[in-house]
Image (cartoon, rainbow, N blue to C red):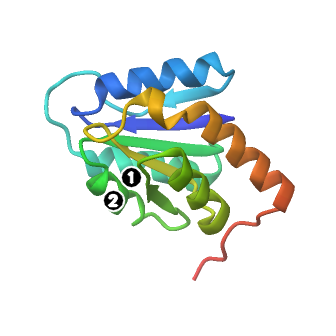
Amino acid sequence: MHIAIGNDHRGIDFKNGVIEILTGAGHSYSDFGTNTTDAVDYPDIAGEVGESVARGDFDFGILICGTGIGMCISANKVRGIRAALCHNVFSATRARQHNNANILVLGSKFVHPGDIKTDRICHDNAAVAARRGIPPRPES
């Protein structure tokens, strides 16, 4: 899978852990996030990732901030995006299976990169979408 990943200043270490897991599993990514601890405007990052996923430039998106709440709200403002704030593999898998989520949002203060098993979620999500033939949600 080709994944768009973005983070604010509270998600740098978490993002680096996720990237290590993703690349180890053979996924490619583009990084839209920050690499400094200077405060950034997370809605801008969420918007960039959201627009890129909505255009079809990426198969999936991952957003990371302290709680995940702000990134999730901001990403869901982009037409065609279904971002889901998840805290474990179960909620992330269900978000994809039942809600056709196309962006996984994680809170770095609540989840450890190894606990979320991002590589498994991406693999499972791709398999679920292919197996079920999940079509994109119609635009309203």
Side (left or right) of 43 relative to 125: left
**For this rendering, which residue is in front, 91 or 54?**
91
> Which numbered dot is residue 47?
1
Q: Residue at x 30, y 37 (%)?
A: 108
- Proximity of marks 2 and 1: CB atoms separated by less than 8 Å: yes
Q: Height in image: 58 above or below 99?
A: above
Task: Kindly report which numbered mark, 2 or 1, lies closer to the viewer in this rendering.
Answer: 2
Instruction: Check disc 1 and report its element: helix, strand or loop.
Output: helix
Quadrant into which the C terminus falls? bottom right
User: Which residue type does callout 1 highlight?
Assistant: Gly
N-term mark: 2 or 1: 1
Side (left or right) of 117 relative to 28: left
Quadrant into which the N terminus falls? top right
- How far is disc 2 from disc 1 in space, using C-alphas? 7 Å
Side (left or right) of 49 relative to 121: left
* Residue 97 picture location, percent across and down: 67, 61
Asked which quadrant contains residue 122, the reply is top right
**For this rendering, which residue is in front, 60 or 126?**
126
**Mark 2 crowdedness (10 Å alpha carbons): few <14, some 14-19, many ≥20:** some
* Residue 123 picture location, percent across and down: 70, 38
Quickly name the residue at label 2.
74
Asked which quadrant contains residue 17, the reply is top left
Instruction: Check disc 2 and report its element: helix, strand or loop.
Output: helix
Q: Residue at x 64, y 67 (%)?
A: 98
User: Which residue type does callout 2 highlight?
Assistant: Ser
Q: Height in image: 84 above or below 31?
A: below
Q: Residue at x 66, y 26 (%)?
A: 27
> Which numbered dot is residue 105?
none
Q: Height in image: 11 above or below 24?
A: below
**For this rendering, which residue is in front, 63 or 48?**
63
